Image: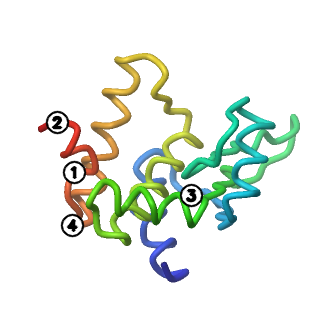
Amino acid sequence: PSQQDFQLWLDKTIPLFQPQAEVTIRIVDEKESHALNHEYRGKDKPTNVLSFPFEAPPGMEIDLLGDLIICRQVVEKEAIEQNKPLLAHWAHMVVHGSLHLLGYDHIEDDEAEEMESLETEIMQGMGYEDPYIAEKE
């Protein structure tokens, strides 16, 4: 995806929840994704997207929301496996990761339902299909 794609996806997600925020997106390979996923989540495999919220020290005012680490190879494999357009899956990973930065999670079923509903609404608002359509069929 282009820088403009990433900016569009962020612009269609973050302002729904806060007026402005900066997000750093880093594209990594499977080796680095695996290492980060193991270190921070205890998972011994690469993953599609990792979200690292920024926590400003007391008294510091900054619009940095956090970092998204996206593994290109995992996103590409998932798009093929899930029969999704590649660009749509990239968009979904940015939306999904951004919602994590904003405090949303999917550990509990009710949280997952709320988060997936928001993701679907945002994705469809950008002209993409429901990213969870295959799971609902």
Q: CA distance from mark 1 to mark 2?
A: 10 Å
Q: Is residue 90 above or below residue 13?
A: below
Which residue is denoted by mark 1 in the rendering?
Answer: 130
- Amino acid found under the numbered disc labelled 1: Asp
Number of residues whose C-alpha sits closer than 10 Å to that of mark 3, classed few (under 14), some (14–19) or many (20 or more): few
Q: CA distance from mark 4 to mark 3?
A: 23 Å
Say whether marks 1 and 2 touch (CB < 8 Å): yes
Q: CA distance from mark 3 to mark 1?
A: 26 Å
Say how many tags the image has: 4
Where residue 60 sits: x, y (%)? Answer: 85, 45
Say whether marks 3 and 2 touch (CB < 8 Å): no
Which residue is denoted by mark 4 in the rendering?
Answer: 127
Q: Nearer the viewer, mark 2 or mark 4?
A: 2
Task: State the mark number for residue 20.
Answer: 3
Name the foreground residue: 76 vs 87. Answer: 76
Name which of mark 4 and mark 3 comes first in the sequence.
3
Where residue 33 sits: x, y (%)? Answer: 70, 53
Q: Nearer the viewer, mark 3 or mark 2?
A: 2
Where residue 110 sits: x, y (%)? Answer: 35, 18
Q: Is residue 30 above or below residue 106?
A: below
Where residue 117 sits: x, y (%)? Answer: 27, 37
Which residue is denoted by mark 2 in the rendering?
Answer: 136
At x 45%, y 77%, the residue is: 5
Res 63 → quadrant: bottom right
Name the foreground residue: 101 vs 83. Answer: 83
Q: Is residue 56 left or right of residue 95?
A: right
Name which of mark 3 and mark 1 comes first in the sequence.
3
Say whether marks 4 and 3 touch (CB < 8 Å): no
